[in-house]
Amino acid sequence: MVLRTGLMLAGDAASWGWRFYLRHFWIVFGLSLPPTLQRFAAITWGDELPAAVNIGAEVLTGACRVLLLYVILRLAVRAEPSLLGLTPALLWQRMGEGVDRDRWAFAVQFLVLGAAFTVLDVLPGLAVELWAGPRSRELVTALLVAVKNPTVIAFTFVWMTGVAVRLMLSGSRRPAAG
């Protein structure tokens, strides 16, 4: 029952996330583009670039990811009428209430995220190591990492925001006093 409830939450959040990702594709893609280019350049030419360029590019990548998460959260909250106008503290409280309501369903999200990480990050990396020739391995790795930024990484942000929104919405339903 616990696993089923957790998988239902993950499925609902992923379904919501897929619709969100498609509806806001250009925003998500645009904010994912600097990290995409940075990762590709770091893998392809990292040793040849000045240290200051690598550090600045990493800072830009981090800032873009923080901004992406912020924008996803803002758009997600604005799309839910019952969450509109709530302060960040109240949203956080709602999410906490949702987690308290069903801790195990929340915990299952980490299992699902771990499985997704294995399938979408570990296995492709192993495939590159096994099947890409030594001369092409760096380029294939750079391309793989570049493709993952606007897809896997960005969708993970959207999906986990979907989990948070579902928890915020469930946290607004308090059990009836007995």
Image (spheres, helix red, strand yellow):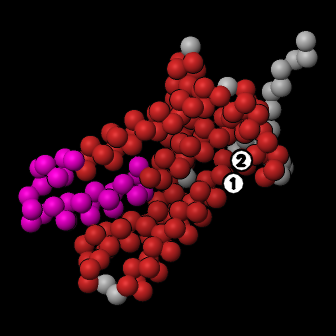
Q: Amino acid at mark 1?
A: Arg
Q: Examine the rendering and report whether any part of residue 47 can be seen.
A: yes
Disc 1 packing (10 Å; few <14; some 14–19; many ≥20): few
Check the image and report above or below for 99 versus 49: above
Q: Are marks 2 and 1 in contact (CB under 8 Å)?
A: yes
Q: Nearer the viewer, residue 79 or 99?
A: 99
Q: Nearer the viewer, residue 47 or 73?
A: 47
Residue to which mark 1 is pinned:
74
Kindly identify which numbered label has been placed on residue 77.
2
Check the image and report above or below for 15 versus 64: above
Q: Which residues are magenta?
A: 126-152
The spot of residue 39 in percent (x, y) is 36, 68
Q: Nearer the viewer, residue 111 or 166?
A: 111
Q: CA distance from mark 2 to mark 1?
A: 5 Å
The spot of residue 133 in percent (x, y) is 8, 58
Q: Quadrant of residue 6?
A: top right
53 on left or right of 81: left
142 on left or right of 31: left
